[in-house]
């Protein structure tokens, strides 16, 4: 097999994998999948920004902290020549599962995984240690108050001119229990058009109650999901912490998703100066 045929075969296999994952998501067989649309979209943006940082600084090493992930799945789309410059620390309370263990095979300069509560690690880690902190699908597991605390920790740990990447699912703004419930309901109703597994999200485990979502949002010691941030809330938290330059990006392909804003998959790039 010559190189051209090999590349064609590799591309076909990649497309088939994406189609299979998309089909499983559409049927509701899979809900949260690596190699899904959202996984690929967020990894693409992470890769582009990491390359920009390394190229602009002409640095030989970029110190990265990944919060809430027991592997380096977030870095899988970064080209090899950039991976070689990454000194990565990962912190998560979970043991790495098979998919995460496979992602640790990425050829980065250095990788250290710490199995620990993220807030505990952030509380004792010294200031100005990391050039970049990445958290993906972490914010919706921590309460409204803990989001504020988390951002303050990140600002302290990031070195001068460093950056913070927050990638998560965001809802529309609210000011009371009813507005929160309506915002959550609109969000899951829209997403269920593309991910049928979410169709029963609002009708099980007392989720049809506005009080349920309000209590969940403010449950500081409960790390279950569904504690979705709003853009306005996160902008306030970031500015109060000291991040005065914040870029909010709705990372959805408009060819696949009709309303990226309501879809709510957001990447925030925050700079520390």
Image (tube, grey):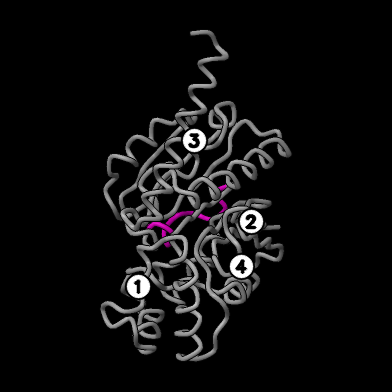
- Marks 4 and 3: CB-CB under 8 Å? no
Secondary structure category for the residue under label 2: loop
Q: Mark 4 or mark 2: which is in front?
A: 2
Query: Farthest residue toward the top?
Result: 2
Quote the CA–CA distance across marks 1 and 4. 20 Å
Q: Which residue is mark 4?
A: 261
Quote the CA–CA distance across marks 1 and 2. 25 Å
Query: In the image, which residues are magenta?
Result: 121-130
Measured as percent of width and height from the top left, residue 37 is found at: 49, 49
Assess disc 2: are there few (<14), some (14-19) or many (≥20) residues with their C-alpha within 10 Å of its C-alpha: few
Quote the CA–CA distance across marks 3 and 2. 19 Å
In terms of sequence position, does the residue under pointer 4 or pointer 2 come before the other? Answer: 2
Query: Which quarter of the rendered picture does the C terminus lie within?
Result: bottom right
In terms of sequence position, does the residue under pointer 1 or pointer 2 come before the other? Answer: 1
Secondary structure category for the residue under label 3: helix
Residue 262 drawn above or below residue 81: below
Assess disc 4: are there few (<14), some (14-19) or many (≥20) residues with their C-alpha within 10 Å of its C-alpha: some
In terms of sequence position, does the residue under pointer 1 or pointer 4 come before the other? Answer: 1
Residue sitting at x 31%, y 54% = 29
Q: Mark 3 or mark 1: which is in front?
A: 3
Q: Which residue is mark 3?
A: 15
In terms of sequence position, does the residue under pointer 3 or pointer 1 come before the other? Answer: 3
Measured as percent of width and height from the top left, residue 180 is found at: 48, 84
Q: Which residue is mark 2?
A: 254
């Amino acid at each position: 097999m010559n190189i051209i045929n090999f590349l064609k075969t590799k591309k076909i296999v990649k497309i088939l994998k994406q189609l299979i994952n998309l089909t499983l998501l559409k049927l509701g067989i899979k809900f949260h999948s690596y190699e899904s649309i959202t996984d690929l979209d967020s990894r693409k943006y992470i890769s582009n920004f990491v390359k920009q940082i390394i190229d602009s600084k002409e640095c030989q090493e970029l110190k990265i902290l990944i919060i809430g992930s027991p592997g380096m799945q977030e870095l899988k789309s970064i080209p090899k020549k950039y991976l070689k410059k990454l000194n990565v620390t990962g912190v998560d309370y979970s043991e790495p599962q098979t998919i995460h263990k496979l992602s640790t095979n990425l050829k980065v300069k250095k990788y250290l995984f710490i199995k620990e509560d993220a807030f505990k690690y952030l509380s004792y880690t010294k200031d100005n240690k990391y050039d970049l902190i990445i958290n993906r699908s972490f914010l919706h597991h921590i309460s409204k108050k803990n989001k504020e605390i988390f951002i303050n920790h990140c600002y302290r740990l990031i070195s001068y001119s460093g950056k913070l990447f927050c990638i998560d699912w965001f809802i529309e703004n609210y000011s009371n229990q009813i507005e929160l419930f309506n915002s959550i309901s609109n969000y899951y109703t829209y997403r269920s058009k593309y991910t049928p597994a979410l169709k029963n999200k609002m009708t099980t485990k007392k989720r049809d109650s506005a009080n349920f979502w309000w209590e969940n949002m403010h449950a500081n010691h409960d790390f279950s999901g569904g504690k979705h941030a709003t853009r306005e809330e996160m902008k306030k938290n970031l500015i109060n912490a000291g991040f005065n330059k914040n870029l909010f990006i709705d990372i959805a392909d408009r060819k696949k998703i009709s309303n990226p804003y309501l879809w709510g998959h957001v990447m925030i790039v925050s700079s520390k100066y």
